Every structure is written in structure tokens, then in C-alpha cells.
Image (cartoon, grey):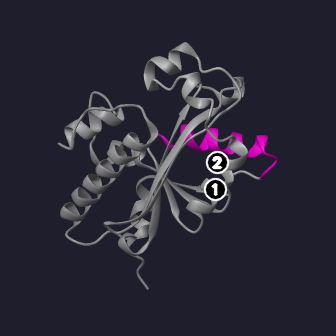
């Protein structure tokens, strides 16, 4: 039996963080996602996270999330388990998935929980590199601009999820047009999905 991706449930997610390296103590400060099947949005998730540490000036310059904004935000122990319930049973998608997954797994580890396991994770950046070869830049904004779906990236989790969703849909349409048929899950696996053991 052929498994077409429009029959599968996907969760596109994004993180904003205090810095670029969780190994140096950086933490998640915002987590957002859209869950969908085919073109139908099923649910959304969007929350700031109070990490209990300072936001680096470099991170603030990018995402404009201040420490004052985080004072009343829920802690990771509340947000992360809720997010794991939200994504249950779906295929995870992210733009530069290694970055977001690394931070998510670190938050789970700090909570004494096992990291993401037995889940298919799709790196939409990898798919873009294969479908749109030889671009000067593969930033989310550059790829979105190339696809004609806007090039403004606000570096806030939910707006980046929206932009990533637009890129995902456009890449899917290009693949289907090139192949003249609906996309199978196997095809997407071959293009950019990481199988998390």
C-alpha cells in the first residue's frame, strides 16, 4: 500500500533561543508549531519559555525577545511536556532541523526525560538544497523569497513556522509538478528526513 504524505500528519516547529549553542548553556525561550494533514491545519502551539537565564545580546538582536518578556512566561517543565504531547504521532519538520532538535533534546534532558526517539524528522533545509540547487543562500528568508512567498523573516518562532510551512508547501508542489504525481512518504524520506533512533 502506498503512503502519500497528504495522508500523514506533520508538525512544523521552530525554536528561539538565548544563544546558538545549548552545549554552552543556551536555552529555548520560545517554541511554536503548526500541525497539519495535507493542506488542513489541525492545531497550533505557541509559547514563550522562561529559561531561568539571561538572553544574550546577540540573540536579542535577532529575535527581540527580552528578559522582561520572559518573566511571566511558563517554565520549561510546563512548556516542553505540553509540546511533546502536541507532536505525538506526527512527523516533525523544521528548517535546519538539527539546530531545533538539538535544543529540544537538551531541554528534555534537563527535565530528566528521554530525547526525541522513534520519530521521523524532516529537515526542510535539506529538501530545499536538493530541489533548488545552486542558490546563493539557503537561509529561510532567501528560499522563501526565491519561491515567491515573501522574504521577510521576523525570527519569532510562530512567524518562522508560518514561513517554513509556506516553503514546505511550495517545495511539495514543485516535486509533484516535476514527477506528475502525488508525493509518497518514501520520496520525502529520501529527500530530507532524518530518522531519529
Q: Are marks 1 and 2 in contact (CB under 8 Å)?
A: yes
In this rendering, is residue 66 above or below 103? above
Horizontal and vertical percent for residue 19? 58, 23
Would residue 91 be found to the left or right of residue 152 on screen? right
Q: Determine the residue positioned at 71% across, 25% down.
A: 25
Horizontal and vertical percent for residue 188? 41, 61
Q: Determine the residue positioned at 37% across, 41% down.
A: 159
Query: Which residue extends farthest right?
Result: 112
Query: Which residue extends farthest top?
Result: 57
> Which stretch appears magenta?
96-113
Disc on res. 64: none
**Quadrant housing the N terminus:** bottom left
Q: Nearer the viewer, residue 193 or 39?
A: 39
Q: Determine the residue positioned at 39% across, 64% down.
A: 187
Horizontal and vertical percent for residue 8? 44, 71
Is residue 134 shown to the viewer in this render? no
Q: Which residue is mark 1?
A: 82
Is residue 68 shown to the viewer in this render? yes
- The overriding secondary structure of the stretch rendered in magenta is helix
Q: Secondary structure at mark 2?
A: helix
Q: Quadrant of residue 110?
A: top right
Crowding at dot 2, Cα within 10 Å, few <14 / some 14-19 / many 20+, comes out as some
Q: Nearer the viewer, residue 22 or 62?
A: 62
In this rendering, is residue 185 above or below 165? below
In this rendering, is residue 127 above or below 7? above
Horizontal and vertical percent for residue 157? 46, 40
Determine the CA span between mark 1 and mark 2. Answer: 5 Å
Disc on res. 79: 2
Q: Secondary structure at mark 1?
A: helix
Q: For residue 32: magenta? A: no
Amino acid at each position: 500500500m502506498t503512503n502519500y504524505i497528504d495522508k500523514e500528519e506533520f508538525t512544523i516547529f521552530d525554536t528561539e533561543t538565548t544563544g546558538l549553542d545549548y552545549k554552552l548553556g543556551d536555552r529555548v525561550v520560545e517554541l511554536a508549531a503548526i500541525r497539519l494533514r495535507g493542506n488542513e491545519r489541525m492545531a497550533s502551539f505557541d509559547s514563550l519559555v522562561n529559561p531561568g537565564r539571561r538572553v544574550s545580546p546577540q540573540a536579542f538582536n535577532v529575535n527581540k525577545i527580552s528578559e522582561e518578556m520572559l518573566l511571566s512566561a511558563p517554565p520549561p517543565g510546563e512548556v516542553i511536556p505540553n509540546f511533546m504531547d502536541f507532536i505525538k504521532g506526527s512527523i516533525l519538520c523544521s528548517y535546519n532541523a538539527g539546530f531545533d532538535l538539538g535544543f529540544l533534546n537538551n531541554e528534555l534532558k534537563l527535565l530528566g526525560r528521554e530525547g526525541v526517539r522513534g520519530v521521523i524528522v524532516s529537515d526542510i533545509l535539506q529538501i530545499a538544497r536538493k530541489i533548488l540547487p545552486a542558490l546563493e543562500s539557503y537561509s529561510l528568508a532567501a528560499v522563501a523569497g526565491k519561491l515567491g512567498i515573501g522574504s521577510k523573516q521576523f525570527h519569532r518562532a510562530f512567524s518562522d513556522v508560518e514561513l517554513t510551512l509556506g516553503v514546505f508547501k511550495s517545495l511539495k508542489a514543485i516535486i509533484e509538478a516535476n514527477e506528475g504525481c502525488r508525493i509518497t512518504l518514501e520520496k520525502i524520506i529520501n529527500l530530507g528526513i532524518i530518522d531519529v533512533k
